[in-house]
Image (cartoon, helix red, strand yellow):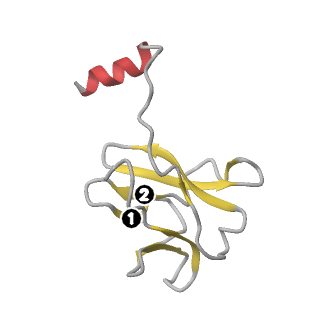
């Protein structure tokens, strides 16, 4: 079935890829990356929904690689670092937010509310 769905994706002109919600992880608070960037959905895998930094001013991805990617494991609804560089620390906080930090948990670069309604839930 999976191979048929993949085949349909490329041969059926009416195929629509599933929509991942939320598309944007809106920042709460003022942090280094939230002033010019927002995390947007970029890619789906069999196990993760991957989000990456979108430069709002340039209306384009902040980088063409996956240096700052974060992801949610769709089987556990757990957020994690998914990039090749910073952030190094992704923490799910007791208040329902997720902090994206640089080298230490206190060096927060971005923070968002963990989605309670999402396409993977």
Determine which of the numbered discs, if any, sits on residue 17 in the image.
Answer: none
Residue identifier under label 2: 71
Residue at 76% of width from left, 50% of height from top? 58
Q: Secondary structure at mark 2?
A: strand
Residue 24 placement (x, y as % from top left)? 55, 54
Residue identifier under label 1: 79
Question: Which quadrant would the N terminus be assigned to in this image?
Answer: top left
Is 104 or 78 nearer to us in this picture? 78
76 in relation to 17, above or below: below
- The residue lying furthest to the left in this view is 1
Q: CA distance from mark 1 to mark 2?
A: 6 Å
Residue neighbourhood size for the residue with mark 1, other residues' Cα within 10 Å, grouped as few (<14), some (14–19), many (≥20):
many
Residue neighbourhood size for the residue with mark 2, other residues' Cα within 10 Å, grouped as few (<14), some (14–19), many (≥20):
many
Is 29 or 42 nearer to us in this picture? 29
Residue 53 placement (x, y as % from top left)? 60, 57
- The residue lying furthest to the right in this view is 57
Q: Secondary structure at mark 1?
A: strand
Residue at 70% of width from left, 55% of height from top? 55
Classify residue 18 as left or right of residue 101: left
| First in residue order: circle 1 vs circle 2 | 2
63 in relation to 96, above or below: above
Q: To which quarter of the image does residue 31 belong?
A: bottom right
């Amino acid at each position: 079935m999976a191979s048929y769905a993949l085949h349909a994706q490329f041969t059926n002109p009416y195929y629509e890829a599933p929509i991942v919600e939320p598309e944007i992880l809106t920042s709460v608070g003022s942090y280094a990356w939230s002033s010019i960037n927002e995390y947007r959905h970029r890619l789906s895998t069999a196990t993760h929904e991957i989000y990456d930094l979108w430069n709002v001013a340039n209306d384009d991805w902040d980088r063409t690689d996956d240096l700052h990617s974060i992801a949610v494991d769709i089987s556990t609804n757990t957020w994690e670092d998914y990039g090749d560089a910073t952030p190094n620390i992704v923490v799910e906080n007791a208040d329902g937010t997720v902090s994206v930090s640089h080298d230490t948990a206190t060096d927060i670069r971005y923070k968002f509310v963990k989605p309670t309604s999402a396409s993977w839930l």
